[in-house]
């Protein structure tokens, strides 16, 4: 399918997709026209971005499946063991397709290795060499299906995440190993699904742990293909939560704390999120507070953020209430598959276990406008940045208690808004520092991609922000080429990340693939066959995709990235 250059790098051209895009735009415009004027103005003028606007009041965002309690074991009665395994993977594919078209975001297994093993045990599938060979083949086919299938909305791949690493018996270990091995063997043009390896002390983190070899296997695969990424269960944010209850959905979503008693991510998801344009608020503050002391500017900046955040809260609550007002039969896949933490009956009883997230983008640019320095360049600017994220988190916590809803602070991935926000702002402001030339805003609390600072320093700067962003966060290390075979070096980065509080870690490097001879590396002309027909794989905002389809802002970001 032909790659599209649009709002989503995962989209591919198709007739159904083209029709959907026309309808999507119409739905969004009608919704914005129907909103209170301040809501629509804030979105249209780039103060905020209401994510997945077309799904407003119709469905939720993402979900980690609680697949075991209500799995349809009866449907497999009377089948041979071979047929059970084959049908099981057919069930997984249909499950992801059905659920993916009934929600707006990512889907995940919290512990694919253990959950898959448990299903096989309950189906009484023998653990022998013949069955393992079949399982390996089916896993390989499933990985290619996740990568190649773009039937969501007629054009988009399904945002599927397989969390692994806590395998508790021999067959579960085999499943985890096979997921990594089949992904690695699938070739460089297979870069989905997202595989997350959960690093946990006593399970896989250190030599002597039962799954340490799986950790090593994962690191060697990452060194080739940038996947798996790593959920660091021993970090400050998550160390008090049992590792099996942790999960990543989509590109970074975290769901743990629940006011209504369902601890952990399994069977829970995010209902909706809104991101706030921090550079816009900083630019307004700087314009209106010229000549004022920094302390006074920061007070004004916080006050302006509160005004915007209160409106974002109103929108999230309205969206939540409208979603609760849907009838259960409007969610046929959810009703039949039953993968929330409670039985899917009345939406009001189910979706209260989800989260509502206020996100942010461009912390670095905002601090630079206010202080004249990038936040990682001086102790004073760094404290300004950290204090402000603490302030945003405090507000989210206050709303959580006041409204009795699961509000959280999200370190937003900015695939679309990194460019959308700056394109609006550059026509309105003339800042005293150059934050516009590069063509994009920096994701969430990240250090600027052109910082050139060391990997260790980057982790130390970003680590303290993770515990504040309880709705989800990630840190990346940017390398200039694939660190093939260097699992020890990557393991050191993982250890350093855990020590400084990083929750979720990804390793980036440029990966170019010759479409003529399949050679890979970093090149404009293939060094093997001389072809200029090159596919470029890059991490866009938490997931890997083909560079040609990136949004304009993200293409600018890729050009600006320097190594750590």
Image: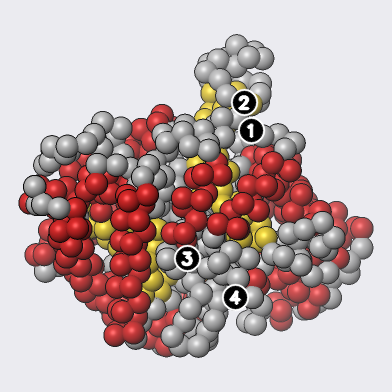
Q: Earlier in the sequence, mark 2 or mark 1?
A: 1
The Cα atoms of the two marked residues, 3 and 1, are separated by 29 Å
Image coordinates for residue 352, horizontal then vertical, percent: 40, 83
Q: Nearer the viewer, mark 2 or mark 3?
A: 3
Q: Residues within 10 Å of mark 1 (few under 14, many from 20)?
A: many
Element on which disc 4 rests: loop
Residue under label 4, please give it: 241
Q: Nearer the viewer, mark 3 or mark 1?
A: 3
The Cα atoms of the two marked residues, 4 and 2, are separated by 40 Å
Q: Are marks 3 and 4 in contact (CB under 8 Å)?
A: no
Image coordinates for residue 198, horizontal then vertical, percent: 66, 61
Q: Residues within 10 Å of mark 4 (few under 14, many from 20)?
A: some
Q: Residue at x 65, y 53 (%)?
A: 495
* Residue 383, quarter of picture: bottom left
The Cα atoms of the two marked residues, 2 and 1, are separated by 8 Å
Residue under label 3, please give it: 467
Q: Nearer the viewer, residue 289 or 557?
A: 289
Q: Residue at x 17, y 37 (%)?
A: 432
Q: Nearer the viewer, residue 114 or 466?
A: 466
391 displayed left or right of 257: left
Element on which disc 2 rests: strand
Q: Residue at x 33, y 73 (%)?
A: 394
Residue under label 2, please give it: 521
Q: Nearer the viewer, residue 271 or 279?
A: 279
The Cα atoms of the two marked residues, 3 and 4, are separated by 13 Å
Residue under label 1, please give it: 482
Q: Nearer the viewer, residue 26 or 107?
A: 107
534 displayed left or right of 58: right
């Amino acid at each position: 399918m032909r790659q599209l250059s649009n709002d989503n790098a995962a989209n591919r051209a198709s007739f159904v997709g083209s029709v959907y895009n026309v309808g999507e735009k119409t739905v969004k415009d009608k919704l914005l026209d129907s909103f209170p004027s301040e809501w629509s103005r804030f979105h249209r003028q780039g103060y905020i971005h209401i994510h997945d606007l077309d799904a407003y009041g119709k469905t939720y965002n993402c979900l980690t499946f609680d697949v075991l309690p209500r799995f349809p074991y009866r449907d497999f009665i009377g089948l041979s063991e071979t047929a059970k395994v084959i049908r099981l993977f057919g069930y997984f594919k249909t499950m992801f397709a059905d659920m993916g078209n009934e929600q707006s975001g990512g889907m995940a297994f919290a512990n694919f290795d253990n959950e898959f093993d448990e299903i096989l045990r309950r189906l009484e599938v023998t653990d022998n060499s013949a069955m393992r060979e079949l399982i390996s083949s089916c896993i390989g086919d499933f990985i290619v299906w996740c990568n190649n299938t773009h039937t969501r909305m007629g054009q988009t791949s399904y945002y599927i995440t397989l969390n692994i690493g806590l395998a508790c018996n021999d067959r579960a270990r085999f499943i985890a190993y096979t997921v990594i091995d089949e992904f690695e063997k699938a070739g460089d043009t297979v870069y989905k699904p997202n595989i997350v390896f959960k690093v946990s002390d006593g399970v896989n983190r250190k030599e002597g742990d039962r799954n340490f070899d799986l950790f090593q296997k994962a690191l060697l695969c990452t060194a080739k293909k940038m996947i798996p990424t790593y959920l660091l269960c021993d970090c400050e944010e998550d160390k008090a939560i049992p590792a099996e209850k942790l999960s990543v959905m989509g590109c970074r979503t975290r769901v743990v704390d629940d006011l209504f008693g369902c601890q952990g991510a399994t069977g829970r998801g995010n209902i909706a999120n809104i991101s706030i344009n921090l550079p816009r608020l900083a630019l307004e503050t700087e314009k209106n507070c010229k000549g004022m002391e920094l302390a006074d500017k920061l007070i004004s900046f916080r006050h302006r953020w509160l005004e915007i955040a209160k409106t974002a809260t109103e929108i999230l609550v309205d969206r939540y209430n409208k979603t609760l007002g849907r009838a259960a039969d409007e969610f046929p896949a959810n009703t039949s598959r039953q993968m929330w933490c409670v039985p899917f009956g009345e939406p009001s009883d189910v979706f209260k276990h989800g989260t509502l997230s206020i996100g942010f983008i461009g912390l670095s640019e905002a601090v630079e406008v206010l202080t004249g320095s990038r936040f990682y360049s001086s102790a004073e600017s760094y404290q300004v940045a950290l204090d402000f994220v603490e302030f945003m988190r405090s507000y989210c916590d206050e709303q959580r208690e006041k409204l009795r809803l699961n509000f959280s602070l999200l370190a937003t991935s900015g695939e679309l808004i990194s460019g959308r926000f700056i394109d609006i702002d550059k026509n309105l402001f003339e800042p005293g520092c150059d934050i516009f030339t590069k063509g994009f805003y920096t994701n969430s609390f990240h250090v600027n991609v052109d910082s050139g600072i060391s990997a260790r320093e980057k982790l130390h700067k970003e680590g303290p922000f993770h515990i504040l962003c309880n709705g989800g966060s990630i840190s990346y290390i940017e390398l200039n080429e694939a660190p093939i075979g260097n699992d020890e070096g990557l393991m050191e980065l993982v250890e350093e990340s855990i020590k400084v509080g990083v929750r979720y870690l990804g390793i980036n490097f440029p990966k170019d693939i010759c479409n003529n001879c399949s050679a890979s590396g970093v090149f404009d002309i293939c060094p093997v066959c001389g072809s200029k027909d090159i596919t470029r794989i890059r991490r866009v905002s938490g997931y890997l995709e083909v560079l040609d389809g990136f949004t304009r802002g993200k293409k600018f970001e890729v050009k600006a990235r320097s190594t750590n």
